[in-house]
Amino acid sequence: MNRLSGITLLLPHGLEGQGPEHSSARLERFLQLCSETHPGVCYPTTPAQIFHLFRRQVVRPWRKPLIVMTPKSLLRHKQAVSSLATWRTGPSSASSWTGGEEGVRALLCTGKIYYDLIAAREAKKRDDVAIVPLRALYPLSTPCWRRR
């Protein structure tokens, strides 16, 4: 049977110290399953990104499973918000550099860690470190490694 599946799995990422009653999706196991035609794996950091992931799953002409890591802490995080413009136009396909335009280092991260790193950089008043949130872990697009 050659039926394509557009199933979307919203899996909790339980590595946040919430205790044994919270299930934990093992991100590394899903990434091991990925190849050219297998599922995409995403770790969105804002509400607009989640909306556009769902929209893309419905609108695109081919069906492919999508695995979305969804930690509960981002639901109530003060910085995890989206502007009206990103709801209308959508986030850019590539991740963007946050600060550190003249930086010597770039930190690639996903999920809640992004907001923790931003807070630590502001607390230490460091402007030599760029923080790049990766939203799509597979397939990983090469432009996300470049500055805009």
Image (cartoon, rainbow, N blue to C red):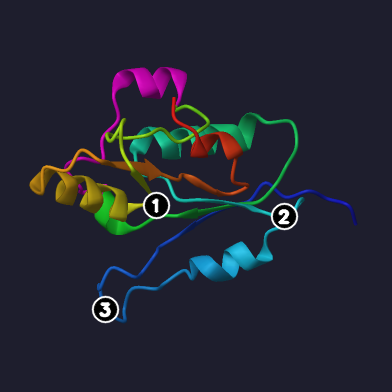
For this rendering, which residue is in front, 10 or 104? 104
Q: Is residue 2 above or below residue 17?
A: above
Tell me the magenta residue range: 75-90
Residue at (75, 37) in percent of width and height:
62
Position of the C terminus by quadrant: top left
Residue drawn at x 26%, y 78% is 19
**Most extreme residue toward the right, as rendered?**
1
Q: Earlier in the sequence, mark 2 or mark 1?
A: 2
Residue 19's label in the rendered image is: 3
Mark 3 in CB contact with mark 1 (< 8 angstroms): no
Amino acid type at circle 3 is Gly
Q: Do the numbered discs 2 and 1 sit on residues whose CB atoms are within 8 Å?
A: no
The residue closer to the viewer here, 126 or 112, is 126
The quarter in which the N terminus is drawn is bottom right
Instruction: Report the Cα–Cα distance between label 2 and label 1.
Output: 21 Å
Residue 110: mark in rendering: 1
Task: Calculate the distance from the C-alpha at mark 2 to the C-alpha at mark 3.
Answer: 31 Å
Above or below, 51 relative to 148 = below
Residue 8 on image: x %, y %? 57, 50
Please state which amino acid type lies under the numbered disc 1. Answer: Thr
Image vertical order of residue 73 relative to residue 145, above or below: below
Q: Report if residue 31 lies within the magenta region.
A: no
Q: In the shown orientation, is residue 31 left or right of residue 15?
A: right
Tell me the crowding category of disc 1: few under 14, some 14 to 19, or many 20 or more residues within 10 angstroms, Cα based. some
> Which tag is nearer the camera, tag 2 or tag 1?
1
Residue 89 sits inside the magenta stretch? yes
Q: Is residue 144 left or right of residue 102?
A: right
Q: Which residue is mark 2?
A: 38
Q: Residue at x 59, y 46 (%)?
A: 140
What type is the residue that disc 2 sits on?
His
x and y percentages locating residue 141 in the rendered image? 60, 40
